[in-house]
Amino acid sequence: MRITCHEWKDIATWNPKPVAPGNEDVQVWLATVPGDSAEMSAYARLLDGRERLRAERFMGMEARNEFVFGRALLRLLLGRSLRVDPTEVAIGYEARGKPRLISGSAVGDIRFNLAHSNSLVAIALAKGREVGIDVEWTGRTVDWPLIAERVFSASELGGVLALPPEQQELAFFAGWTRKEAYLKATGEGLTDEISDIEFTFAPGMPAELLRLPGADVEAVCWEIHEVPLPEGFVGALVVENGRKPKSKR
């Protein structure tokens, strides 16, 4: 598997030449929400009617712009991969809300996932394999000990609390993004079993999926990768690797 990271510049320098991910490729695109209102208007014109209605429901301008820009950039990337105009990309939703290309438009079986935080947008694209990506800005105020008690396993929580105090919050964000990326890859969304999904996330330790609820062997079907992000952000990428779980005897 080959994971490549790309930085989005702007719509004016965009090259629409078709470049779809290959069978062994996972593309990660990073971009910052533009501050220019005219540029944002150009992106907004790429959205479909349902996306525009969703954008209007956001109360805050920052959150609205993150949504609009993220969806527009996703359409640009998918359009280039599928060799269609971005406005013609047909996106539907699974029962738990995971977005997917509607059958008939998914030439080459492109899978994707999107995340955004504090004006940073991250998009993962792959061919024929599920992907999930999550990013978090570590500068936001969050009662992380309370959240960690609900979403971390006893082993994970103990590992965080054993770290030096100055490392604990960053470890929390690392663990949270890895769990989120996994749930987005599988399409499960937030679940009561989130504490049974265990990852390594101590500073300096390689990212690894250790355990899934009730089916430890299935952890081999997924790979977890850190995402190189600007300072102040933490992120994770989870990718289906195509391996088959061993049958239990």
Image (cartoon, rainbow, N blue to C red):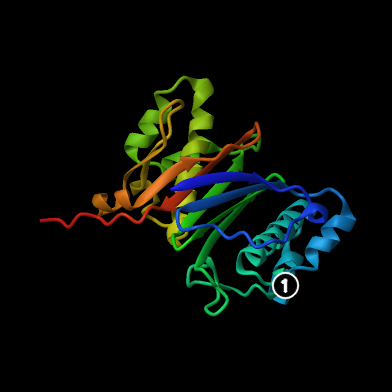
Q: In this image, 160 relative to 72: left or right?
A: left
Question: Can you name the residue that lies furthest to the left here?
Answer: 249
| Number of numbered callouts drawn | 1
The amino acid sitting under disc 1 is: Thr
**Residue 72 sits above or below residue 85 on the image:** above
In this orientation, does residue 212 appear? no
Residue at (70%, 47%) from the top-left corner? 31
Pick the quarter of the image with the C terminus. Answer: bottom left
In percent of width and height, residue 117 lies at 65, 46
In percent of width and height, residue 149 lies at 42, 40
Q: In this image, 170 relative to 199: left or right?
A: right
Question: Can you name the residue that lies furthest to the front here?
Answer: 17
Q: Residues within 10 Å of mark 1 (few under 14, many from 20)?
A: some
In percent of width and height, residue 57 lies at 73, 66
Question: Can you name the residue that lies furthest to the bottom here?
Answer: 104
Q: In this image, 235 relative to 88: left or right?
A: left
Nearer to us in this view, 84 or 92: 84
In this orientation, does residue 155 appear? yes
Label 1's element?
helix
Residue at (51%, 24%) from the top-left corner? 167
**Residue 70 sits above or below residue 9 on the image:** below
Nearer to us in this view, 102 or 63: 102
Residue at (35%, 41%) from the top-left corner? 153
Nearer to us in this view, 54 or 45: 45
Question: Can you name the residue that lies furthest to the top here?
Answer: 164
Residue at (35%, 56%) from the top-left corner? 242
In percent of width and height, residue 176 lies at 49, 43
Residue corresponding to mark 1: 87
